[in-house]
Amino acid sequence: GKVEGRQRKVPEGSEEKGLESTGRATNDFFKRRIRREIYRYRQSQMEKITAKLILVSMWGMKEELVAKTEEH
C-alpha cells in the first residue's frame, strides 16, 4: 500500500511495528470511539432538552391553573 510521510521506516528484523501495520486498526478504533462519544453526548443533550421541556410545560400548566383559580 501507499506509505504516507508521517510513517517512518522500521529496520528489518526489528520487533517494533511501523504505523503502516497498525494504522488502519487504530483509525477504525478511534472512529468507532468518536462515534460512540458523539452518540452519548447527543443522548445526554436530548435528555436535558426533554427535561427542560417537561419543566416548561409543567410550569405553563401551573400558570394556567393559577390564572383560572384567580378568575373565580
Image: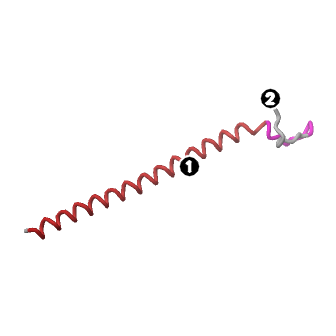
Mark 1 nearby-residue class (10 Å; few <14, some 14–19, many ≥20): few
Image position, residue 42 (x, y; %): 48, 50
The picture quadrant where one finds residue 72 is bottom left
The residue lying at 28 percent from left, 58 percent from top is 57
The tag on residue 2 is none
Q: Nearer the viewer, residue 65 or 30?
A: 65
Q: Amino acid at mark 1?
A: Glu
Mark 2 nearby-residue class (10 Å; few <14, some 14–19, many ≥20): few
The picture quadrant where one finds residue 28 is top right
- The residue that mark 1 highlights is 37
Residue range in magenta is: 11-20
As for residue 70 lying within the magenta part, the answer is no
Q: Quadrant of the N terminus?
A: top right
Image position, residue 24 (x, y; %): 72, 36
The residue lying at 57 percent from left, 44 percent from top is 35
Compared across the picture, whether 62 is left or right of 70 comes to right
Element type at mark 1? helix
As for residue 18 lying within the magenta part, the answer is yes
For the rendered model, the colour scheme is: secondary structure
Image position, residue 3 (x, y; %): 83, 35
- The residue that mark 2 highlights is 1
Q: Nearer the viewer, residue 55 or 23?
A: 55
